[in-house]
Each structure stands twice: as structure tokens, then as C-alpha cells.
Image (tube, rainbow, N blue to C red):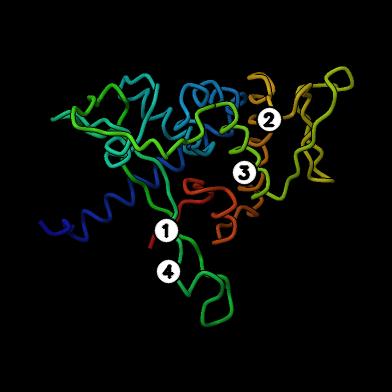
Amino acid sequence: MGRKTYTEEEKAAFKERDRELAEAADAALAAPGAGARATEVALRSPKLAAYSLRNHMMLALQAEQAGIELRDVDTGRGWKERGRTPRKGSKAVMRIVYPITPKSGEADTSEDGETPKTRFRTKAVFEIDQTDESETFTSDPKVAPESDPARIWHDRLLREAASLGYTVRYTRPDEAAALAVTDGESKTIAVAAADPLALAPEALGALADRLAEALTAARADGSAKPNATAARQAGPDAGTVLEFD
């Protein structure tokens, strides 16, 4: 069976749907405590911990609208690789952003010498309650993915900070004025942590809050511009800015 084709009207409707979702996610990201709320969800599963702050806003909005409690999500293919399959009749009612990176040989510069623009699309995901265990799945004992959501989320936030030009440093809790403080002049975020390698959920939430504020400010002043390098730094689902052909 060949790949399904869509009419121009359908493509336009998809673009409008994604544009509205992106705008709603940006508004949610600008709300106080957005990062802390994303952290609470991210710590529920390694997969959720790997998603960007903006994708968390998208998932939260769609899950609330569909009456879904987020525990773990993945694409249809992703679930199959994890030994589960979307239940027959289940509809993927949530979408996340992922980048379309330039093809091999085009990733560094384009014909005019400019860095080619990374475009972003959305793809459907299923919540774990929409899936069933596969009776024929056999796991690969050689594959041992990171399983600690807190560590994955911490790394995710550090990559998002780097993509914005921020450096995260750590201070002793007894010397910190708050769990996380942003210095816009030096572009640093100071996080109170007794052990930088094992941040407490509260510290992760505070760091995420400061990054949500930085992302919102960058969009407001137009400095959040997508490119291939930023997409690679922030990860495969960064969703820095949603663009369309």
C-alpha cells in the first residue's frame, strides 16, 4: 500500500490545526509555573522526560481536551518497538512536534551560503492506555536505554538551555536565594543543588520554570529562530519554532 496523499485543502487544514496548537502551546508555556507542571508529568516515564518543554505544553492541552491522563506516550512505531501495539480502533488524538532536518550534504550550508532552515512538523502519539502488550514481542538484551526519568529530564533541560545560549550552574542550597535564578546579563541559570547529578523534583521544576520564561522571552524578541544546529542541540523533538512550507 502506497503512502496516502492529501488534497491541497486537506494540507491547508492540517497546517492550520498545527498552527493553532503551536500558538496555544506558546501561551501555555508563558503561564506561571509551566515548567514545574511539565516536570511533574515528565517524571512519570522516561519517554515523557525526553520531550521538550513546548511538546509538554502541547501534550497537556490535548490530553485535557480529550480527557486523557498522561502516564506514557509514544508513536505507533515507538510502541511496537517497546512491545506494545495501539489498540484496534484507538485514535491518536495527540500530536507532538519534530524537526525535518536537511538532507545529507545540505546540513551545513545552502547554495547561498546560509545555514539551511530546519522545518518542523507534527506527528501523532498514543497514550499507554490506548495500547496493549504484544504477545510476540521479544526484547533485545543488548539494548539498555536510560530508564531514570529525572536524569533524562535534567539532560533534556540542559540541552534546551544550551540551545538558548544559557549555561546552567549549581550552587549550594544554603547559599542560594531561590531554587533557580536567571541572570539575563551573563545568560546563566543558577540552580540550588546538593548533588548536581541527582536534582530533586523541586529543583528540576524550578529550572524548567526559568527555561520556560527564557523561551517565552526569546520568542517575544524574535531571537528564537530555528536552525539545524539548534535542533540537534535541543534534540529530536525540540519544536523550537513551528514552521510550514
Residue beneath label 1, please?
100
Disc 1 element: strand
Q: CA distance from mark 1 to mark 2?
A: 28 Å
Q: CA distance from mark 3 to mark 2?
A: 11 Å
Between disc 3 and disc 4, whose residue precedes? 4
Q: Which numbered circle lies on residue 207?
A: 2
- Local crowd size for mark 2, using a 10 Å CA cut-off: few (<14), some (14–19), many (≥20): many
In the rendered image, the quadrant that contains the N terminus is bottom left
Q: CA distance from mark 4 to mark 2?
A: 34 Å
Q: Residue furthest front?
A: 141
Q: Residue furthest right?
A: 175
x and y percent of residue 163 in the render?
64, 50
- Dot in front, 4 or 1: 4
Look at label 1 and name its amino acid: Ile
In this rendering, is residue 229 above or below 194?
below
Look at label 4 and name its amino acid: Lys
